[in-house]
Each structure stands twice: as C-alpha cells, then as structure tokens.
Amino acid sequence: MDCEAEVLWSEKVFVAFPQNHALKGKAEIDWCDIEGEQFIASEMVPGSEVSDCLVQRLAVRGRRPDVRLCKLDRHNLLSLVGLGRGLTLTSQATTVSTIPGVIYRPIDGEILSFSAVWSPRNDNPALRRLLSMARQMSAAAS
C-alpha cells in the first residue's frame, strides 16, 4: 500500500539523569559517555522505542544495555531518574518540564523526526485541514 509522508518537525534527543551525576558538567553527551549505565523506560508508549534505541546505540560486543521497564508514565519515570534509579531518553519538548533532581543534556547528533503518514486515496476534508494546520504550525515554529 502506497503512503504519503511528511516530516513536520524535529527535536533533539536528550538524556535525563540525576543532578548529581558525573556527566552533569558536559554540555553534550556522546553515546560512549553512557555505556554501562542503568536505564529506565516506560512500558507505555514510547518506552519500547526508547529501549530499542538504547540497544541499537549501546549494544557492544554482545552485551546489551541494562534497560528496566517500569509501569509508569513519563512524568513519574522522570521522578525516578531524579531519585537516582537510572537514566532515560527523552525528546527536547520534555526538557521544559522541571522535575526535582533531574537535568537534561542533548545527545550529540541525535535527532527525532515527527511525521504525518496518510493514504493518498484519503480525500477526507478533515485530513486535508489537519495537514494544512500541521504544516502552518511547523512553519511557524521554525
């Protein structure tokens, strides 16, 4: 099935870690900086994507990163980060949230794109209005 797709916006990927972490002084984090760390991710969306990203970027010599899945939403997961239970990945939009004990640093070169995907056969006027609004908002944010 053919689909149309359009990237609407992109954000940097950040690592969230406790404010007393050894990497707090770095402006940007490299993947090699966080090898061997313990990570936590939500069992809810986008937890599996976070876990998959960590495995893809950090699996070395047959050793998988330590990723623990928790039955928590994003806000509560970040509270666990602040308590020193592990690191997690998040998008740039999340970094505006102030969570006690949590600091955010961008991962060098990691960008997360947000896209719309739809069927070209869909001539629903609501879809066309949604795409038009999303394009306008994306352009205004640039």
Image (cartoon, rainbow, N blue to C red):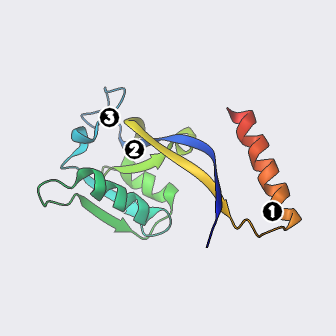
Q: Which residue is mark 1?
A: 127
Q: Amino acid at mark 3?
A: Ile
Residue 87 locus on image (x, y percent): 33, 50
SS of the residue at dot 3? loop
Among all residues in the image, which is located at the extreme bottom? 1
Q: How many marks?
A: 3
Q: Which is nearer the eye, 139 or 50?
A: 139
Distance CA(mark 1)–CA(mark 3): 39 Å
Image coordinates for residue 100, horizontal then vertical, percent: 46, 42
Residue 129 location (% of width, % of height): 85, 56
Disc 2 residue type (three-letter): Ala
Q: Which mark is residue 29?
A: 3
Q: Which residue is mark 2?
A: 16
- Give whichever of 107, 122 is nearer the camera: 122
Q: Residue at x 78, y 69 (%)?
A: 122
Front of the two marks 1 and 3: 1
Q: Quadrant of the C terminus?
A: top right
Res 51 label: none
Q: Quadrant of the N terminus?
A: bottom right
Asked if the residue at tag 2 contacts the one at tag 1, i.e. Cβ–Cβ closer than 8 Å, the answer is: no
Point out residue 127 in the picture as x, y percentages from the top left corner.
80, 62
